[in-house]
Amino acid sequence: MKLPPRLSSEAHSLLKGLLQKEPSKRLGSGPNGGNEIRSHKWFQSINWKKLEARELKPKFRPDVNGKDCTANFDKCWTAMPLDDSPAPTPTADDHFQGYTYVAPNRWLSSG
């Protein structure tokens, strides 16, 4: 796996650990589970107890105008046409006989 050289050695180590192809070798899959990720040197400056207690203030807080605000997303994503799914509805085989689909919310429906 080739990562950009501009990343720190800590970032390289974290990403390589999380992106291991073999699940049993992936960071966080050992006997300590998620604590293995928390104790990684990339996260050494985080006080996890304060974070979980919501006692830490974020360094950056985006401006958000309502729950549907997309102002913080690049226009290349927000200008894309809405598609319910990139895959066609399955029609072959007996496995999909009687298959129907209803979009879970209005953002995913095409109407």
Image (tube, helix red, strand yellow):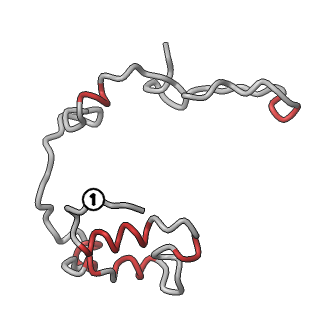
Q: Residue 105, percent across and down?
A: 49, 29
How far across and down, in percent of the image, does residue 79 sit? 30, 22
40 in relation to 3, above or below: below
Q: Amino acid at mark 1?
A: Pro
Name the residue beneath numbered marker 1.
Answer: 4
Q: Residue at x 19, y 33 (%)?
A: 71
Q: Is residue 3 above or below residue 70?
A: below
**Residue in the foreground of this view, choosing between 105 and 108:** 108
80 over 46 or under it: above or below: above
Front residue of 28/8: it is 8
- Numbered disc 1: secondary structure: loop
Residue at x-position 66% and y-position 27%: 101
Q: Residue at x 49, y 13 (%)?
A: 111
Q: Residue furthest bottom?
A: 31
Q: Is residue 75 left or right of residue 111?
A: left
- Location of residue 7 (image quadrant): bottom left
Q: Indicate left or right for 60 with 88 as reference.
A: left
Residue plotted at (77% across, 24% down): 91
User: Where, quadrant-wise, is the N terminus in this rendering?
Assistant: bottom left
Q: Is residue 92 left or right of residue 56?
A: right
15, 100: nearer the viewer: 15
Instruction: Check disc 1: other Cα within 10 Å, few if <14, some if 14-19, many if 20+.
Output: few
Number of marks drawn = 1
Outermost residue toward the right?
Answer: 94
